[in-house]
Image (cartoon, helix red, strand yellow):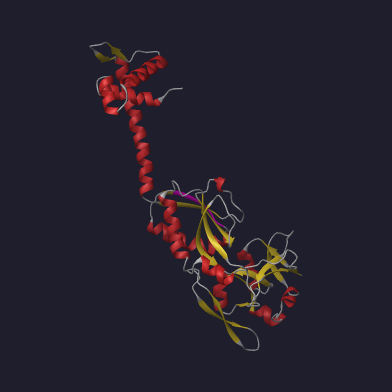
Amino acid sequence: MTNYNDMFLFSKVVEHNGMTGAAHALGMPRSRISRRIAELETSLGARLIQRSTRHFAVTELGKEFDKHCLNMIAEAEAAFDKVAQARERPAGLVRMSCPAMLAQYVIGPLIPLVMRDYPGLRIAIDTANRDVSINENFDLSFRIGQMPWEDSSLIVRSLGIYQPLLVASTEFLDRRGRPKTLDELTKMPTISYSTPQGPHIWTLISPEKTEIQIRHDPTLIVDDFVVIRQAALQGGGVALLPLSLCLDDIREGAFEIVLPEYRAPLHELQAVFPSRHGILPAVRSIIDFLASHCAGDVERCQITQHLGQGRREHARFWVSRQSIEELVRNSFVRHPPSPGHVQS
């Protein structure tokens, strides 16, 4: 196989009119350059340089060969310059994977703003409702992960904190009643984000900060949060939905929070990418932009909700801008329940 480094050395020998001049210019021993040029001529089966103790001359074939060597060097330098330019400014195609719900309600609305700020970007989004392998040639993937997350070889950046809540439509609760206990909840129609095989279990945090698993028998099973939201708004049952997806519905009174003293563990919107080393400016710029905008997506707010008999109370949701450590301190179970602690 041709050693293209030898073509570079040959061009330097021609440029500096001899082995000695090339050796000085490159900081290499003259003997090494002489040996490499000899090996190049042997591999080509042709004489490129006429040598003598007093005379140095490039053959006619050597001159033609040198032209191609210079073209090769120029193309190599252009290739390196292209990469350097790409690393200096956000440009080019970025392939992203994003679950449909996030694409519609969180990431998708921000993409036009990213592209407005970085007009050189091109973005391709695969709305895959599945776990995506980093080996699938995506530059960037988004996922919702429960905190605290498991150790992973992937690089994960937090974009915001999200709180899932039990909700149901006001019309449904007016018709079926408002559950006051978990037992009453499990007797009501529910909607599950799962596969038909299950298991259909809601993990909730009690007012005492203990984790409880609630088995339920859903009347509707869907693997898409957007469809679940639509079904719940139409009175299909109680659903566990991310606050970011149903916040406006709660504010407008279309949804009520069911058993607000119970909530699901916090989840985190995560950007996942292969490595911090060599990450292109386009990918880094997208991550930084989304991190700055998603962090304030769920502000600390008070949401008024109807809890029956005309009584109104306030449920407080903490901002995603708070540190993860503070959220964990305030919201997480310190002593996980025993494996048998499952309420049916």
Which residue is painted at 52% across and 69% down in the image? 326
Q: Which residues are magenta?
A: 93-98
Residue 252 percent coordinates (x, y): 55, 79
Residue at screen point 72% across, 80% down:
176
Between 124 and 71, the one nearer to me in the picture: 71
Q: Quadrant of residue 24?
A: top left
239 over 11 or under it: above or below:
below
Considering every residue shown, the one lying at the far left of the view is: 54
Residue 239: % across, % down: 66, 70
Q: In this image, 131 relative to 298: left or right?
A: right
Residue 315 lies, in percent from the top left, at 57, 79
Q: Residue at x 45, y 57 (%)?
A: 287
Which sits in the foreground, 319 or 101? 319
Quadrant position of the C terminus in the picture: bottom right
Most extreme residue toward the front is: 335
281 within the magenta span = no
Q: Please, what is the dominant secondary structure of the magenta stretch?
A: strand
Which quarter of the picture shows residue 76? top left
Q: Residue furthest bottom?
A: 310
Residue 190: image x %, image y %? 71, 70
Above/below status of 12 relative to 199: above
- Number of marks present in the image shown: 0
**Residue 212 location, quadrant:** bottom right
Above or below, comparing residue 201 to residue 136 in the picture? below
